[in-house]
Amino acid sequence: MNVIALSVYILVEELTLEKANQNYCKAIRKGMFKVFSKMGISTIQSYRGAQIFEAIGLDEELIRDYFTGTPSRISGVGIREIAQESLLRHETALEKTPETREILSGGGLYHWRRNGEFHQINPVMTNTLQRAVRKNSQDAYNEFSRLVNEQKQRFSTPRSLFEFAEGTPISLDEVEPAAEIVKRFVTGAMSLGSISSESHETMAIAMNRIGGKSNSGEGGEDSARFDKRTNGDFPNSTIKQVASGRFGVTIHYLVNCTEIQIKVAQGAKPGEGGQLPGNKVSEEIAKIRNSTPGVTLISPPPHHDIYSIEDLAQLIFDLKNANPQAKINVKLVAEAGVGTIAAGVAKAHADVITIAGHDGGTGASPLTSIKHAGVPWELGLSEAQQTLMLNQLRGRVRLQTDGQLKTGRDVAVAALLGAEEFGFATVPLIAIGCIMMRKCHLNTCPVGIATQNPELRKKFVGKPEHVINYFFFVAEELRNIMAKLGFRKVDEMIGRTDMLKQRTNVNHWKAGKVDLSAILHQIPVGEKDTPYCTQKQDHGLDKQIDLKLIAESKDALEHKKAVEFVLPINNVNRSVGTMLSSHIAKKYGAEGLPDNTIHCKFVGSAGQSFGAFLAHGVTLELEGDANDYTGKGLSGGRLVVYPPKKSTFSSSENILIGNTVLYGATGGEVFFCGIAGERFAVRNSGVMAVVEGVGDHGCEYMTGGRVIVLGETGKNFAAGMSGGIAYVLVENQSFHSRCNTEMVELEIVSELQEQKWLRKWIERHQDYTKSYRAASLLENWEKTLSQFVKVMPIEYRAVLEKMKNKSSIK
């Protein structure tokens, strides 16, 4: 004890006023940078006066006088109520009672604490729901529903201030059956990695049994789950998510679903990326995500191929080519202005739009996001519905919402505000055993759900029947509400905000001042529109050049016979090779065709996403140049691009391909006889690439594969690079200042085998592209070799050495 006391004393003594000031400034700066990054702000000038915040529950006069110009859709308290609340908080701090004299309050902001802050889900509710689903007890579910729905006395959500208008009741027998209603239910996007395979598969099996949909999350999925089991169960997630990290997003992954969701943001932590700690990246997870066991995986905050609505339209087009039968879903978060964004997404030809609320229960979300980011789904959903109706776009898309839906009453409110589909995540997890320990990010989940620890996973007791029982309870509760309101089908109640009204019997000194009239505003149905989806989007696939590729490749597709042909190309030809790869993946799976079975040479300028998700066995050769997103999601194919043979310029000094090339690529090889734009090989996890120069942010967030750069790089090379290796030819010392060494170290290429390997790939590059640059480097190999710098991720090297030592012991 004396040693401990002495250590603390020394620490306190060493903390000078100057050091304390430095620590404080550092903490404030990091906090501000975190907010900047969430909002996509790069400079202090852009932050000042940006008004990036939204006010909820403040009256118009207060907004006008103190927060001029701040968006606000729910009016409420004024300056008097704020003053009163401040005085009450001050009085609480000075209270002296037997309970608080000795100890400080636990708070309960993150974990539930007795006498702490109110939580929408507490231990009593958790136990009640688990009793209901495990025993299939209607009485227990009714008690759970009462506990949830009576939270309207705590005013924890906007819907707690709603009540249903009086309708014309009908017989319950006239309402559509629960078996049809549950087909509208969707489980939330929880990645394999964040949760265990047992819990992930349980959700998928349950939803497939009832005709609903489960969401894979952003971590990919084991291809063994794409086939039905002998007992008839289907563990395949019918919604495959594509997020910023693009983990496990291959052409084989994309063809095995009925819906593909683009996660623009997450309701529980909008504006943030994600991080799977190395201790949760097991061999199983690493295999699925095309990474290395034990190496931390980072999802960047933005999609690096979405910087405008036109970019989003391109990604939608890419994914529709990858799986023409799948609906394309775009997930947005509830925020001021989401209606305008939703209108743009509908025009970009999305089939489904998801509006995610801030109440998502992930325990891995930072506390600052849980408390201060995002808004309730009621606000976002109503704005999206109203804006789509105003622009006569509502009939083109399905609207889905999620964010702590729990009961049939919640579903009824969501439908009346405009939703056709309903997402659940936290409560289904509770149904299969979650006890809300909030340890999701620590790999220590005691019930085997949010962990990859084999011993803890043995404790998982969830069954598909538990999820199924829960959803049928919700559906039956909804049916009873529909019968009271006079609705026979869910479609009839979509957007019927006239059947909702704000409660008038609210005596609370703050809640009584809230005005929700903006949420309940109803837009008349346009002449060519409907209040719910009745139309199919035209994605223009009938005009794709891939139809020619598929016709020319008939022998290869049917008999694996090698084919070779030449076609012209221009920049209106987008996503070339993607639909062809879809056909290959559906028939031959992840392995694709034998190498170079299909060899297509193009002459001209390729449009965006040339070779996106290209399958193994296909070689696309291009004499010309290519646009942005070339090789996006490359899935084993080969790309060869070089300038026109008649060109007189030096290819090693000119741009050949656009920005964000090889984004999320998982396998294959590419040879580019020229310079690439910015963010080359961002999130590459398995491709072997040779290029003659790159722009800024090369190899950003890379987790695997190899990149050889035979020329200069831009700034910020290797930022966030946690895996894979890059070899950069450094003919001057500028590279060392341009490389981001936060996660990597720079080395020489010293091992003989590695030197031979490097030469072999430069020789292949010269063979495929006839590169003058490669030929000159090979002529003077000793000098060339001495100029190469090896960019090695620190964590990746440590894991490789550990694996090497482990194998040598065996």
Image: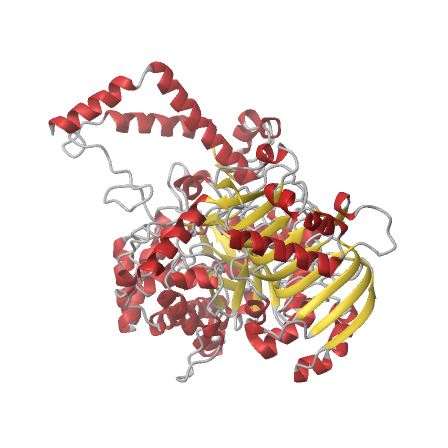
Left or right of 681: which side holds 290? left
Q: Is residue 381 visible?
A: no
Query: Furthest-left residue in view?
Result: 1
Q: Considering the image in quadrants, where does the C terminus appear?
A: bottom left
- Residue located 63% across and 61% down the image: 669
Q: Position of residue 726 (x, y in %)?
A: 57, 48
Left or right of 403 in this view: 689: right
Q: Quadrant of the N terminus?
A: top left
Q: Position of residue 734 (x, y in %)?
A: 63, 33
Q: Which image quadrant is residue 283 in?
A: bottom left
- The vertical placement of 142 against 551, above or below, is above
Residue name at image x 25 percent, y 60 percent: 127
Residue in front for this viewpoint, 110 or 754: 754
Question: Which residue ends up furthest to the top in the rendered image?
Answer: 17
Q: Tell me what residue is drawn at x 40 percent, y 64 percent.
A: 284
Residue 748 can be seen, yes or no = yes
Give the vertical position of 45 relative to 779 (above or below): above
Residue 113 percent coordinates (x, y) = 25, 44
Q: How is the image coloured?
A: secondary structure
Quarter of the image for residue 354 reads bottom right
In front of the other: 56 or 810: 810
Vertical placement of residue 282 versus 364, above or below: below
Residue positioned 73% across, 71% down in the render: 599
| In this picture, residue 454 sits left or right of residue 22 | left
The one nearer the camera, 408 or 780, is: 780
Count of numbered marks = 0
Please indicate whether residue 641 sits to the left or right of residue 148 in the image.
right
Image position, residue 64 (x, y; %): 57, 28
Relative height, residue 222 to residue 724 (above, below):
below
